[in-house]
Image (spheres, rainbow, N blue to C red):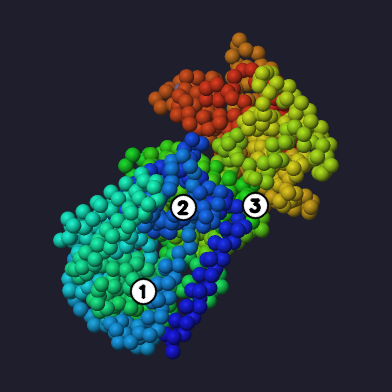
């Protein structure tokens, strides 16, 4: 007996799931610190009461907010949503004793959460001075209803759904009877028309498979309207309140007679007029019912002011009686209202028998329509299905399945939706797929289509090529002209935080990069509300909010699950995982990635470590697609703009870096094998710094600010590096493993600036960074390959540079470009020297000849040659500023940012349009040198003389190197 089997197995799995849920709550209550629970998204701590009102038909609605006086205005990332059952607790506890009440979430914004408290007969004992904790409660109402439905299914005989049940369990084959359709919506595309015709002609069951953006709701609405036209009564359900409300709105717009069941607290404001409560309030009994409600509200208000127990009791009794009267009057009205509606809408579990539907006869409805069917447990669908002759199931089983806590229950089949099960049973004969999508630029769509929908999707011409730059008020820059942007952090040392919990992973480096990209988008004119920032982990969502929400309150930052069913013009996706082991964990759910990617209309940016995430075949296909069809950048390009002052260290490193500048050198001596030089170097500047900061903060002896510490630290490290460079006997400099990731970032920046190879080695606590001189016989080596090269003692020929994996390739390209830029800078310095020399009043301190400069440039990588030629040709011409004809032959200046020659009146970056680049360059300098320069970061003349001398020496030796290489080549 297939039904019996299904029912008993499912009941068992539901029980398992329920137990897992209860167990999880118990474990959390007992073992997990409240703060950790908060980072899991299941509770909100230390909230204050924002407002309190007796809205929503006598229910008390309390709005809770983060504490204002400590300057936080956004809630931590959380999984609370409208309809969730929550408990309000006094701070410090999570026991029944400290529980103030339970209620239903009515609204969640980034700044506040509103909760409707039910039947709080004596009002809620909350005051605006105290702080409260809010917890999500496990809700067994849903379980009871599902169990009830399954048992009813098992014992079903002779009701309206008998035939449907037979088909859904394979006892009989689905039938059909085609009929001509006069479409109400003339805009439907072919696949939508086919789906509507199919749904109307099927006798028992039709499945509408709607991939992202294919107009599933449009199609379902047409199907329902057609059925209504035929005189059918429809029960329409979806698993989430949001989806139900969406259908209510769309159907109401088409003048269907709709009625929405459900706690009014759970409905959107615009939907409330279609809710049973609201319709009741406007029914024939209006005045009486309204009077009773008013009396209830009044009683509540008075009751709050009363403290005497006896008096309170009287009020309670009064309220109780008023409610009873209200109920009898309502029951009569409800039946009448339900019968006159054409479409009754509810959530799957809201369609239960213990709600208003109990007032209707069992065979009242003809069809049941279930939207979002792939997101629902099959058992929850059966609550409604038992009432129908025929069902329409719409959804996309390639998006996220219902959330299930018990892994074993999921594996044993609880996560298989009715939609999937039917497709397995009947194949395409019961399914029609919508294939034209109205959301994504085709470049974004193609990957999902290929990987998830057998390549069957096409982009409608209205969206096929749309880009951010086509939006009004958006300027045309690189970021707004590309549908796909991959920002690759591979090899940049932006590792994920080391936390054990799979649900809460974070990556500060990716946060910083996302911030820069959001900045670029908003500066180009994209509204923050048109951008979604999506991360698969709650912790990352939180880090992103901390960084971005204050500046962009309208920017939506959520987990993947929070965006299902939504879309945004631009989506920025941070994949978080970056580790040596190549673990992707939670990310490995293909459907989760599919949902994240397919939220984007015009632009998708993915920030990730391709080396880590490529270990997963599905993610690799995304990376490959983006590499092939989109723009790829390496995070190195962004690292320059990440100011270390703002670089938050991860937990593990905090202690190390906080003490690094003072007392940690002895500890290091004992624990690490840092080179002697490094150790000496560390002590000395430490003293100097102390002396220096004494001067600045004479009276104030308090601890250094983070900014000052970064400055000092940067100077210390720089000095070590410079000492190392002077000492020709040393080939590499290993920094101690006590260096925090922040310190390593500083090393990274300094060595990047000086053109040195640098590499991180070791795992976890043993991780340390090593820098070495650039190898002379070849372009700057890819650092992670350095180790291998040194071991094998073989140096590859520069021409034989293999075509490596994209991330490696990227990085070497970037390093090459850095090198080219460095050369340009040197070239420029040389030209400046030259021009100074030609000016009669100035005497040159620099003895280098013009010939050496050529050699230097020519000795660079071959592809630099073109750049050199162009530069030379440009140098021959006139000022690059529009309409300026001034010669730049003698007094021209090369702009470092656009690589063009300008006359003296136009060479300043701000004058000819390189202002922004100059500013960001200045920011980078500030961060690297820890010194603030006036204006846009141009150095004043009083440059640190030591540093100047050092740079001069470095330039000299580099030129010498290149010149000698040149000689050996030509001989
Ligand atoms: N035939 C059509 N012609 C033009 N635009 C359409 C058509 N069908 C749907 N759209 C547009 O596509 C968008 C999505 O449609 P709809 O809201 O019906 O889809 P949905 O089912 O809610 O989304 P999803 O497919 O992601 O679940 C809407 O902006 C709608 O106007
Ligand atoms: Zn310029
Ligand atoms: Zn000019």
In primary-sequence order, the first of circles 2 and 3 is 2
At mark 1, the secondary structure is helix
Residue 198: give x, y in percent of width and height: 27, 76
User: Considering depth in this image, is 303 or 384 the residue closer to the camera?
Assistant: 303
Using the rendered view, name the quadrant where residue 718 is placed. top right
Residue 860 versus residue 788 in the image, above or below: above
| Residue for point 28% across, 71% down | 357
Quadrant into which the N terminus falls: bottom left
In primary-sequence order, the first of circles 1 and 2 is 2
Give the CA distance from mark 1 to mark 3: 44 Å
Using the rendered view, name the quadrant where residue 320 is placed. bottom left
Of badges 2 and 3, nearer the viewer stands: 2
| Residue for point 83% across, 39% down | 669
Please rate how many residues cluster around mark 3, counting C-alpha atoms within 10 Å: few if below 14, some from 14 to 19, many from 20. Answer: some
- Please give left or right for residue 426 compared with residue 412 in the image: left
Farthest residue to the top: give it. Answer: 841
| Residue for point 74% across, 51% down | 762
Q: Which mark, by number, is residue 383?
A: 1
User: Considering depth in this image, is 257 or 736 the residue closer to the camera?
Assistant: 257
Of badges 1 and 2, nearer the viewer stands: 2
- Please give left or right for residue 537 compared with residue 380 in the image: right
Residue tagged by mark 3?
Answer: 498
Residue 645: give x, y in percent of width and height: 60, 34
In primary-sequence order, the first of circles 1 and 3 is 1
Q: Ligand 1 is in which quadrant of the figure?
A: bottom left
At mark 2, the secondary structure is strand
Give the CA distance from mark 1 to mark 2: 33 Å
Q: Is residue 897 visible?
A: no
Residue tagged by mark 2?
Answer: 100
User: Considering depth in this image, is 410 or 837 the residue closer to the camera?
Assistant: 410
């Amino acid at each position: 007996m297939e039904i019996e089997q299904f029912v008993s197995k499912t009941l068992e799995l539901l029980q398992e799931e329920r137990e897992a849920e209860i167990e999880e709550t118990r474990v959390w209550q007992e073992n997990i610190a409240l703060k950790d629970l908060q980072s899991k998204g299941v509770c909100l701590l230390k909230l204050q009461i924002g407002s309190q009102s007796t809205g929503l038909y006598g229910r008390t609605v309390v709005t809770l907010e983060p504490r204002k006086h400590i300057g936080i205005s956004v809630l931590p990332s959380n999984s609370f949503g409208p309809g969730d059952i929550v408990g309000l607790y006094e701070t410090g506890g999570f026991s029944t004793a400290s529980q103030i009440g339970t209620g239903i979430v009515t609204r969640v914004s980034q700044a506040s959460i509103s909760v409707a408290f039910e039947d709080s007969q004596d009002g809620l004992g909350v005051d605006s001075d105290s702080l409260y904790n809010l917890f999500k409660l496990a809700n067994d109402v849903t379980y009871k209803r599902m169990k009830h439905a399954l048992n009813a299914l098992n014992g079903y005989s002779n009701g309206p759904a008998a035939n449907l049940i037979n088909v859904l369990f394979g006892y009989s084959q689905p039938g059909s009877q085609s009929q001509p359709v006069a479409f109400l919506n003339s805009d439907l595309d072919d696949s939508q028309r086919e789906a509507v015709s199919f749904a109307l002609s099927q006798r028992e069951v039709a499945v509408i498979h709607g991939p992202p953006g294919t107009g599933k709701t449009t199609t379902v609405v047409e199907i329902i309207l057609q059925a209504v036209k035929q005189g059918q009564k429809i029960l329409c359900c979806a698993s989430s309140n949001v989806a139900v409300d969406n259908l209510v709105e769309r159907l109401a717009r088409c003048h269907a007679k709709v009625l929405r069941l459900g706690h009014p607290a759970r409905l959107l404001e615009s939907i409330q007029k279609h809710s049973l409560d609201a319709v009741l309030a406007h029914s024939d009994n209006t005045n009486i019912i309204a009077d009773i409600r008013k009396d209830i509200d009044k009683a509540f208000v008075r009751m709050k002011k009363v403290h005497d127990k006896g008096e309170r009791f009287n009020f309670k009794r009064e309220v109780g009686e008023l409610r009873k009267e209200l109920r009898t009057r309502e029951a009569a009205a409800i039946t009448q209202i339900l019968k006159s509606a054409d479409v009754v809408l509810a959530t799957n579990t809201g369609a239960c028998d213990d709600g208003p539907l109990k007032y209707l006869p069992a065979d009242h409805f003809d069809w049941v329509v279930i939207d979002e069917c792939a997101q629902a447990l099959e058992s929850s669908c059966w609550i409604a299905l038992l009432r129908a002759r025929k069902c329409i199931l719409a959804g996309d089983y390639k998006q996220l399945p219902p959330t299930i806590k018990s892994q074993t229950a999921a594996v044993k089949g609880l996560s298989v939706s009715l939609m999937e099960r039917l497709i397995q049973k009947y194949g395409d004969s019961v399914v029609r797929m919508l294939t034209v999508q109205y959301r994504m630029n085709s470049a974004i769509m193609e990957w999902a289509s290929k990987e998830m929908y057998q390549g069957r999707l096409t982009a409608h011409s209205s969206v096929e090529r749309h880009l951010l730059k086509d939006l009004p008020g958006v300027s045309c820059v690189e970021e707004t002209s590309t549908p796909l942007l991959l920002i690759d952090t591979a090899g940049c040392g932006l590792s994920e935080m080391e936390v054990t919990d799979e649900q809460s992973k974070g990556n500060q480096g990716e946060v910083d990069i996302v911030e820069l990209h959001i900045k670029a988008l908003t500066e180009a004119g994209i509204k923050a509300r048109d951008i979604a920032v999506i991360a698969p982990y709650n912790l990352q969502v939180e880090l992103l909010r901390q960084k971005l929400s204050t500046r962009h309150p309208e920017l939506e930052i959520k987990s993947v699950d929070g965006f299902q069913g939504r879309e945004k013009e631009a989506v920025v996706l941070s994949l978080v995982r970056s580790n040596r082991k190549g673990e992707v964990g939670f990310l490995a759910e293909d459907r989760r990635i599919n949902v994240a990617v397919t939220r984007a209309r015009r632009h998708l940016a993915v920030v990730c470590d391709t080396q880590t995430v490529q270990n997963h075949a599905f993610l690799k296909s995304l990376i490959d697609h983006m590499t092939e069809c989109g723009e790829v950048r390496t995070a190195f390009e962004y690292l320059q703009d990440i100011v270390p002052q703002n670089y938050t260290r991860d937990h593990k490193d905090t202690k190390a870096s906080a003490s690094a500048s003072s007392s940690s050198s002895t500890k290091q001596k004992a624990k690490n094998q840092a080179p002697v030089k490094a150790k000496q170097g560390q002590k000395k500047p430490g003293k100097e710094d102390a002396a220096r900061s004494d001067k600045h903060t004479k009276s104030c002896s308090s601890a250094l600010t983070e900014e000052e510490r970064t400055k000092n630290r940067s100077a210390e490290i720089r000095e070590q590096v410079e000492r190392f460079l002077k000492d020709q006997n040393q080939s590499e400099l290993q920094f101690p493993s006590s260096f925090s990731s922040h310190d390593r970032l500083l090393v990274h920046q300094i060595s990047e600036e000086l053109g040195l190879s640098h590499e991180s080695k070791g795992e976890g606590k043993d991780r340390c960074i090593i820098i070495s001189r650039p190898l002379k016989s070849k372009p700057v080596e890819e650092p992670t390959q350095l180790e291998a090269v040194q071991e094998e003692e073989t140096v590859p020929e520069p021409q034989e540079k293999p075509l490596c994996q994209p991330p490696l390739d990227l990085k070497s390209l970037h390093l090459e470009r850095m090198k080219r830029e460095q050369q340009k800078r040197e070239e420029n310095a040389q030209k400046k020297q030259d021009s100074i020399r030609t000016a009669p009043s100035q005497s040159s301190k620099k003895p280098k000849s013009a010939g050496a400069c050529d050699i230097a440039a020519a000795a660079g990588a071959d592809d630099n040659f073109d750049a050199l030629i162009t530069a030379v040709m440009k140098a021959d011409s006139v000022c690059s500023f529009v309409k300026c004809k001034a010669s730049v032959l003698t007094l021209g200046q090369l702009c470092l940012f656009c690589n063009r020659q300008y006359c003296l009146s136009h060479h300043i970056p701000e004058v000819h349009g390189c202002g922004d680049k100059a500013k960001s360059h200045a920011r980078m300098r500030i961060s690297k040198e820890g010194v603030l320069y006036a204006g846009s970061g141009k150095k004043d003349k009083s440059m640190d003389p030591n540093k100047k001398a050092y740079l001069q020496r470095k330039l000299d030796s580099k030129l010498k190197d290149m010149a000698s290489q040149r000689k050996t080549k030509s001989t």
